[in-house]
Image: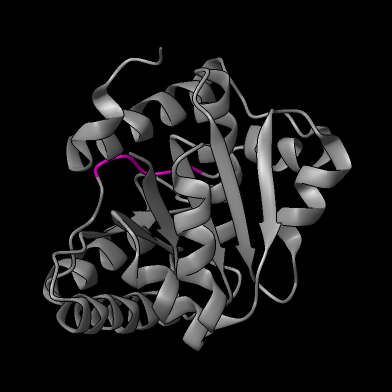
Amino acid sequence: MSTVITIATSKGGAGKTTTAELLLGAYASQGRRVAAIDADLNHSLSDWINRFDQYPMTLRQELDEAKIIPLVEALADDHDVIVIDTAGAATQATVFAIGCADLVLIPCQLSSADVVEAAKTTQLVASAAAMSRQSIPARVLLTDYQPNTVIAGHVESELVACGLDVIPTKLNRLVAFKEMTFTGTIPTDGGAGALITSLLRDVATIVPALNTPCP
């Protein structure tokens, strides 16, 4: 059974594509069969995958909301993990991508606008869950994070005040995450590699199927 992780936020530039790249590369490196669905008009994820072809994975581009769920169903039998990168807006395609997810990750940088849009996206997930009559866990993922700063503390307080669930791992502002956009290779060592390992561990606590070792 495939696990579907949708990366969504109604704010552009929050780190959706970077998060998708990290997850896809990490799961592929584990030997899992991964598929990427690029539902963003800017197709940044598709460009990254096609440019480097670094990891074995299936790539599909789909902007038509009516085709999102059939595409996920078609990929599910032959893939262990499906990661959907959505547009930086609350499009119908995003709603359907959320509706078929086992987990929605909501990237959020250190700004007031990111917090507002994270709250809106969480509400969107709740609405999609109500429509599909199923539980869809959503977690805010802090990206481009600067630890031990006033703004970090303020944003985290705002997220708590909004009642949003924040995933424990935070993706710090590190050169290694920028470099991978030029090299196509996700970090495996140092601070960046440790953060990716920690993120996968956090995700597996929410989606137990990802605790299963690869065949």
Q: Would you say residue 53 sits in the magenta stretch? A: no
Please, which residue is most extreme toward the right here?
A: 51
Q: Nearer the viewer, residue 68 or 77?
A: 77
**164 in relation to 30, above or below:** below
In the image: residue 128, left or right of residue 69: left
* Residue 209 relative to residue 45: left or right: left
Which residue appears at 38% of the width and 54% of the height? 142
Dividing the picture into quarters, in which one does residue 35 lie? top right
Q: How is the image coloured?
A: one colour
Q: Is the C terminus in the top left, top right, bottom left or bottom right quadrant? A: top left
What quarter of the picture does the N terminus occupy? Answer: top left
What residue is rendered at 52% in x and 49% in y?
A: 75
188 or 214: which is nearer to us? Answer: 214
Residue 60 visible in this rendered orientation of the protein: yes
Observer able to see residue 90: no
On screen, 140 above or below 58? below
Q: Nearer the viewer, residue 74 or 142?
A: 74
Residue visible at 60% across and 49% down? 36
Residue 3 picture location, percent across and down: 36, 44
- The x, y position of residue 103, in whole percent, is 30, 54
Q: Nearer the viewer, residue 194 or 72?
A: 72
- Total label count? 0
Q: Which span of residues is magenta-colored?
A: 168-172
Prevailing secondary structure of the magenta residues: loop
Relative image position of residue 52 (x, y in whole percent): 84, 36
Query: In the rendered image of this protein, does residue 203 appear above or below residue 150?
Result: above
